[in-house]
Image (cartoon, helix red, strand yellow):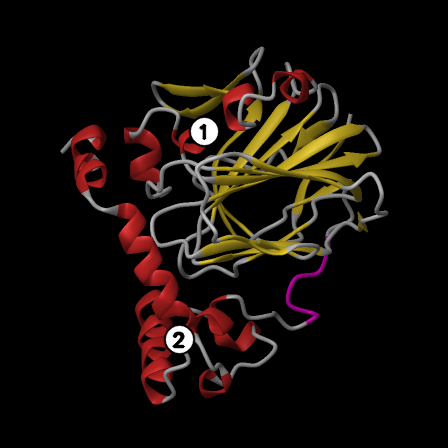
Amino acid sequence: MSDRLAVLPQYLLPKGALTNFAGRVAGAKGGSATTGLIRWFVGRYDVNMDEALDPDISHYASFNEFFTRALRPDARPLAAADYVCPVDGRISQFGAIEDDQIFQAKGHRFSTTALLGGDSALAEHFRHGSFANLYLSPRDYHRIHMPCDGKLTRMIYIPGALFSVNPTTARGVPGLFARNERVVCVFEGAHGPFVLTLVGATIVGSMATTWHGVVNPPRTATVREWTYADRNIVLKKGEEMGRFLLGSTVVMLFPKDTIRFNPGWQPAAAVRLGEMMGNGQ
């Protein structure tokens, strides 16, 4: 079956209703029912609870508390690198931005301007720059950390679709990451601006950042933006910056001549928070 045919049902499903329902279930404090759901999930996806700060499943009052669980402080040491991987997951794609085009999958590209909600001035900073798309599967740790030091300047909520972001969908849905709902976080770093974009997906109940809390819901039909010129929000490399309540994808953008990626990185390879992502050029 072709990837386009495999994703056809996603165009027909009531993705918004499914996502809202999943969000209510994940946030519910259902006692033994919640514990049973978590136990099933741990077994189904082979989640390693030994790495969790609290490995006792019965201590989590809701599925969301379990899903966004903290890790032990020693579970993800930071590599001695200029840029570290911000998540546990798999590499969807990474590499050079060709003019303003980001490679999604064979036959599919999307523009930096589209990803950033039509902000061509912001996108211009990343012309001929570098990108990395990292996919978080259900079994992964779902907090997102900083790849390098950065001062927060803007956050932009961009409404959109709620397609799945798994590899099959990335191959089958054109412009996937620039079509889905997303939260664009803009930072100023040592080499200029860089972007971490949290991409929503089917049954991703919400996305949150450490400085704002839950960004969505509400799910609005218009772009919302926050600026932080009056606040000194500086996050260090490896520090938590956000989380998914049910999993998705992070898309990072860096200016030209900023990062040389880890030569061991390959598309579809598993990655872990804190490992070397790259060094400066």
Q: What is the quadrant of residue 88 in the picture?
A: bottom right
Q: Is residue 106 left or right of residue 118?
A: left
Instruction: Residue under label 1, please give it.
Output: 178
Nearer to us in this view, 247 or 269:
247
Magenta span of residues: 73-78
Q: Is residue 21 left or right of residue 252?
A: left
Q: Position of residue 133 (x, y in %)?
A: 51, 36
Residue occupying the point 31% across, 37% down: 169
> Can residue 70 be found in the magenta stretch?
no
Q: CA distance from mark 2 to mark 1?
A: 31 Å
- Is residue 239 depicted above or below 127 in this figure? below
Say which mark, if any, is on residue 28: 2
For this orientation, the residue located farthest to the left is: 1
Q: Is residue 46 visible?
A: no
Categorize mark 1 by other alpha carbons within 10 Å: few (<14), some (14-19), many (20+): many
- For the C terminus, the image quarter is top right
Label 2's element? loop
Q: Is residue 32 left or right of residue 235?
A: left
Residue occupying the point 65% across, 73% down: 72
Nearer to us in this view, 67 or 50:
67
Q: Position of residue 203 (x, y in %)?
A: 35, 54
- Is residue 185 depicted above or below 273 in this figure? above
